[in-house]
Amino acid sequence: MGREQVALEDVRAFYRAGEDILAAALPPGTARVVASRGTGEVFEAELGDHARFEGLQAGTYCIEALGPDETSLAEQLTTIGSHAGERPVHGFATSFVPESVPVVLDWLSALRCTVVQVYDWMESYSAPLGPPSGWKDPSGREVSFDALRSLAVGIKADGAVAHAYAPIYAVDRPFAAEHPELLMYRGDGAPERLFDNIVLANPADGRWQRHFTSTYGEAADRVGFNGFHVDSYGFPRAGADGQGQHVEMRTAYESFLESFRGQRPDDLISFNQVNGVPSGLSLPGGPGFRYCEVWPPNDRWRHLEGLLDRSAGKAVFGGSGEPALGRPALRGSIACYPPVWAGAGPEARGASLRTVVLTEAIATCLGASALLYGNAAGVLCDPYYPKHEVLSPAEAETVLAWHWFALRCRDLFLEGEDTSWYEIGDENGAVSVDWGGPVRPEPVGGALFVRVVRSIDHIGVGMVDLTGSANGSWSEPTSPGRCMSARARVLLDAPGKWEAAVATLGSERGHFVPTSFIVVSHREGLAAEVEVPLVAGWSVLRLTRK
């Protein structure tokens, strides 16, 4: 699980596209070092004292050292892009005492994180940085300044962004009492608040914007953060300022984010659109990504796609919903807290774990990322991150197997057109999948979830077995599925010009393995027919133009 189990240790989690990657500590007998992506491209390194790749473009790569007989000697996963938020690999950290730092860093490194949300590290929401001797966070937990700084340094040393949690409008009650002019108010005249200890400031107020930027910026510079997760709570929906004027929250958030970006131009910034609120939010320019926290009524896996699209504004406004940097590589990033860990026995925990790993698999096939894992073998189950579940060593190994499989395959679902909704089940579709049970283009319980993504040179068909889920919910335990294999037929312009490969979770280390196909008749010509095994519940078929 830790660093000792990965080789090529100098390959860090994130590099900017176009920069060189060095793979050091090559195993004895290394003859070649290659970098491969889920889309099928393979790149050869130049070997010397190190293996050097020049000018790799954005993507997630498996860097592999091969012996003279092509035997794999070592491998590592790494993600590159124009900035870390272009293709975030999420993690979280929420333990800030010296003894926790090494084990937390080991787990984040094993996850190959590029963005680590450092959660609830502040002394107070309106004055986040405490004294050098340390402090207690708003919930009374001990925070060591030295441990917090070591954590940030270690995250960045591993190539990731130390992403400071920073609520956009949360203030403590003493600050609220001193600055009533900065607050938002309810229709009955009382200040907007969350629980008893958090009062809400007006994010559109320039004075609050300056206070936030000054205090959180100073804290980031002293601790070593190089990014911010700007949080919101999904409300208010009818707030007013101190003069009783309605605060339009979309405008208020956009004003705040533009002001903050102006003062922190290089930091990675995400903003939490809770359940997609407000829909169609415009993100500021600069490094960033769209982020959605998921709550009921979006309590089914099939709700995630619509939630991501509404957040970007595509379904509501018909706009592109894209940040100023151009077309985002990912559809967006989700955070959810599967409350499935109530049972204590092995069978109950197995069903809980399956829900969690399936959630990341589904997000990957939807072209999104998911924040689920972090700290020390932790998995989120509550919006207050310190209440996370701790995985057993065996459970952690299962998580890494699914997570690494997601990283190997993710680029296939990020680069191309998603044609699932007019392929699967459409009699005119160019792709069909059969296994003897229901097949759906959306992740619903009791079915095989199939996603199709196309580009000129490759076709990806992702298959996730959800037959063990009664209701297709990310908030309910899931039993093992019953789909052992599926037959895919894919219409091709000229089958002889294409080759097939299959990646199977639980087999061949999750690598894509070349496979043969037979040519069968299709109403429009000829199709490739491939039998795809499902060993652990997730497989991906890739067809690549030769």
Image (spheres, rainbow, N blue to C red):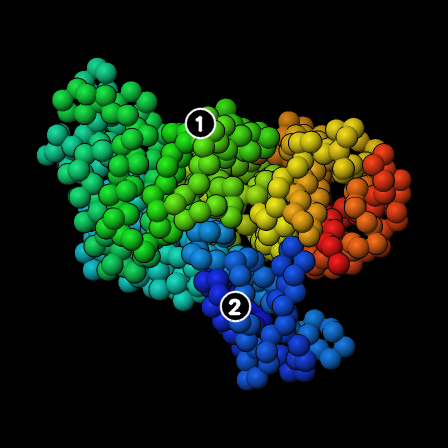
Horizontal side, residue 377 vs residue 163: left or right: right
**How many neighbours does mark 1 have within 10 angstroms: few (below 14), some (14-19), or many (20 or more)?**
few
Viewport quadrant of the N terminus: bottom right
Residue 425 rendering spot, x and y as whole percentages: 75, 29
In the image: residue 242, left or right of residue 169: left
Residue 104: tell me if it is visible: no
Crowd tier of the residue under label 2, counting other residues whose Cα lies within 10 Å: few below 14, some 14–19, many 20 or above: few
> Residue at 43% of width from left, 59% of height from top?
160
Say if residue 246 shows up in the picture. Answer: yes
Q: Split into 4 quadrants, where in the image is the C terminus?
A: bottom right
Q: Residue at x 45, y 32 (%)?
A: 319
**Residue 440, how many percent across, how many down?**
70, 31
Q: Residue at x 69, y 31 (%)?
A: 422
Q: Quadrant of residue 289?
A: top left
Which residue in the structure is indicated by mark 1?
317
Tag 1: residue type? Phe
User: Does residue 304 lie above or below 237 as drawn?
Assistant: below
Q: Earlier in the sequence, mark 1 or mark 2?
A: 2
Q: Position of residue 246 (x, y in %)?
A: 23, 21
Does 212 sit left or right of 356 as displayed?
left
Q: What is the spatial separation of the Cα atoms under label 1 and label 2, in whole angstroms?
A: 38 Å
Residue marked by disc 2: 55
Q: Secondary structure at mark 2?
A: loop
Instruction: Pick the residue in front: 72 or 366.
Output: 366
Q: Amino acid at mark 2?
A: Gly
Residue 151 in which image quadrant? bottom left
Total number of numbered labels? 2
Q: Is 445 on the left or on the right of 7, as rendered?
A: right
Look at 27% across and 52% down and name the residue there.
264
- Element at label 1: helix
Q: Which quadrant of the view contains residue 472?
A: top right
